[in-house]
Image: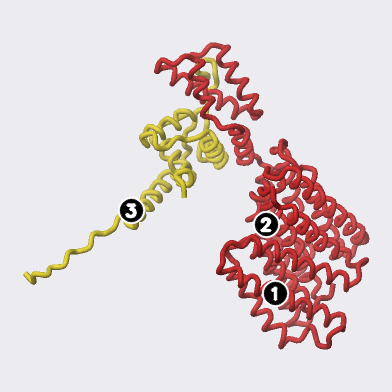
Chain colours: A red, B yellow
Amino acid sequence: MRTKLDIEEIELFLDRQGLSFKPLKAELLDHLISDVESRMRYGETFEIAWNQVKGEIPSNHFKILQQQTMETIDTRFRISRIFSNLFLALMIMGSFFKFMHLPGAGILLISSFIALAISLLSGSLSGLIINRGKQGGIWLVTLVLGVLLLLTAYCFRILHLPGAELAAIVSVGLLLVSVLGITIIIRRHSGEENLLTFLHEKYASSIQRALVVLLSVGVLFKIVAAAKGSDFFVGDVTLILLIYGAGIQLLLFLWRAMAGNIQQSQNMVLTAICAICLFLPILNFYIPFAPRMVMAFTFYILSGYLIYQRVDNVTIRPWFLLFAGLNIVHFMGWSLMKMEVLPGDVQNILYSIPVAIIFVVPFWLFRKNKLMLTYWVLVFGAFALQFTQNI
Amino acid sequence: MSSKEFIRGTLKTIILKLLAENKQLYGYEISQRVAELSGDEIQLTYGALYPVLYKLESEGLLITTSEIVDNRARKYYSLTKKGHELAREKVNELQKFTDILKNILVPIPQPKMNLSGT
């Protein structure tokens, strides 16, 4: 049995390690004392045994352990997961109702956006509370608020409510400010993990799943609408959300790669330009078509270049170059035809269907590389949107 | 793949198995049993053990009771009914998998050719 002073010393050590979750602290106290006692049975003094036990614990080990444990049991993370699944379920149901012309489709789709918003909010707030010590919390909140306002803007558009433009303007403002903040934080604390990249590592797979559902729903809407000659609105909104979702996912992947590497200042600037080119076209009611297309073109080239730099697989590199190049040529042609600089019909089915078939191939080619796959999800979403776009 | 990754993938099953064989165990005891049974080959870190215990508890596979031992609280873990069922299932799965691995890793002896014709 240890003296009160011995126990206090071990408790003090746990406090200094940043352990604040009492049940875990009590359990670790018992574990450490048991370990010390076990060593003392072999003739060691308390001081020597305690120093041996302490010496075997890596720095920050308990802090990380507490974070992991909290995330495991924290109901807020569970709430985030439940709502992200609800978002997918409502999205699929809403789309089905819309196709079948059943009442309530609009409500279901709007509810899916609300579920997505709650999921994003609860996930990021829980991350913020549990990982207080990590850098960049304020920029995470700014980014999430920007995304939420973007969702609000599109909900308002669907419901034909006033205020959609204002929500979009504030959203773009917040998104651009967050890009600036994140770039500075990664540059100042390069080599260290920040809250945004830390949380993204946990949520990247869920975001990817949501993007695949959005793409499937959006494309399905476009196909049915094209076949029936009916309204493209819901499909267009879904695809626009997909493009921004995939774009943000791409930026997060790039930031994550840069956060762990100090020699990345040029790439950080290029990523920031990519982000500006992605977010500014949201203001389509203020920015004319031609500058928006220049921005989209710049985004494709810069993000394609940044991804190409990170592809280690020599077999897949030429394929990425080929398809990214094909997309850029196709996009340039489409933009010039749309602006009537080049003659031709942008909706020509004899052209669009073969392009669509070719554009499906990279999903299989890039399936093992998240960065390239995300890029292609964005490219395909944008291609589907170009086809009979009316928003 | 390092041994750490093997342990990460099987730790849940190891803990369930130990608790299935013992009425109740506390954290330090679990880590000692693992070290003992593995001939000190597997040393569980705090970071590996406790998140799994909390996860199993939150999934309703474990129940906990606390006792005061030598002026400090000790938390004991034991399996629920659902935990016992899962322990059986997981141990069977892992045994089958290790048998398959053995078959892959240990070369099957080739039959010798009889060249004398007898």
Q: Which mark is residue A325?
A: 1
SS at badge 3? helix
Q: Is residue A67 left or right of residue B59?
A: right
Q: Is residue A332 left or right of residue A36?
A: right
Residue A100 visible in the picture: no
Residue at 79% x, 51% y is A143
Circle 3: residue type: Lys
**Camera-nearest residue between A170 and A78:** A170
Tell me residue A342's x, y (percent): 84, 85
Residue A207, numbered circle: 2
Eye-nearest disc, 1 or 3:
1
Tell me the subunit letter for badge 2.
A
Q: Are marks 2 and 1 on the same chain?
A: yes
- Amino acid, disc 1: Gly
Q: Please tell me which residue is depicted at 59% across the width and 29% down the height of the picture.
A: A24
| Mark 3 nearby-residue class (10 Å; few <14, some 14–19, many ≥20) | few
* Left or right placement of residue A252 versus residue B15 in this view: right
Q: Secondary structure at mark 2?
A: helix
Position of residue A40 in the picture relative to residue A240 (left or right) = left
Q: Residue furthest left?
A: B118
- Circle 2 or circle 1, nearest the eye: 1
Q: Which mark is residue B102?
A: 3
Chain ID at mark 1: A
| 2 and 1 marks in contact (CB < 8 Å) | no
Residue B111's place in the image compared with A219, above or below, is: above
Residue A362 screen position, x and y as percent: 62, 72
Q: Which is nearer the eye, A6 or A323?
A: A323
Q: Quadrant of the C terminus of chain A?
A: bottom right
Residue A43 in view of the camera: yes
Chain identifier of the residue bearing label 3 in the image? B
